[in-house]
Amino acid sequence: MAINQKQLKRKRRQKRTRAKITGTGEKPRLSVFRSGHHIYAQLIDDVKNKALISVSDSAAEIRQKGNKVSLARAVGKLIGEKAQEKKIKKIVFDRAGYKYHGRVKALADGAREAGLEF
């Protein structure tokens, strides 16, 4: 199965930024993945290779009507709230090669509203 050119370029950008940023237990990496229909976010401790928290727009707490951008903001708020419960305040944002625009930006804004610093 061939990867189209757009996906290939995103993977290259993702690889380039992953080489520079890492998450730790005190300052985990907020990784974002967006598909055509959904958006997913994880807080990852790269030292232990473990996902601390994961949230998607199909979570029971978020299921609501609205456009994709409003759902992405809700995902950001939810992951921020869950991080606050685990006493996590500072994170490293990993946009995974996506442009900081639209749903990715809305997720980041929602996480900031919930109290995460990055």
Image (spheres, grey):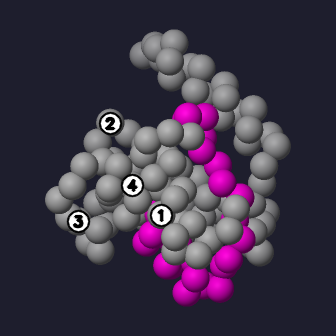
Disc number placed over residue 63 in the picture, else none: 3
Q: In this view, does 4 lie to the left or right of 43?
A: left
Amino acid type for the residue under numbered disc 1: Gly
* Rendered image: mark on residue 36: 2
Q: What stretch is highlighted in magenta?
A: 76-99
Say above or below: 23 vs 100.
below
Quick one: label 1 or label 2, which is nearer the N terminus? 2
Q: Mark 4 points at which residue?
A: 72
Quick check: 88 left or right of 63? right
Which residue type does callout 3 highlight?
A: Arg
Give, as a three-letter code, the residue at label 2: Gly
**Helix, strand or loop at mark 1:** helix
Q: What is the secondary structure assignment of the residue under circle 2?
A: loop
Q: In this view, does 28 lie to the left or right of 19?
A: left
Residue at the spot 23% in from the left edge and 65% down from the top edge: 63
Residue 110, label in figure: 1
Specify which label sits upstream in the sequence, 3 or 1.
3
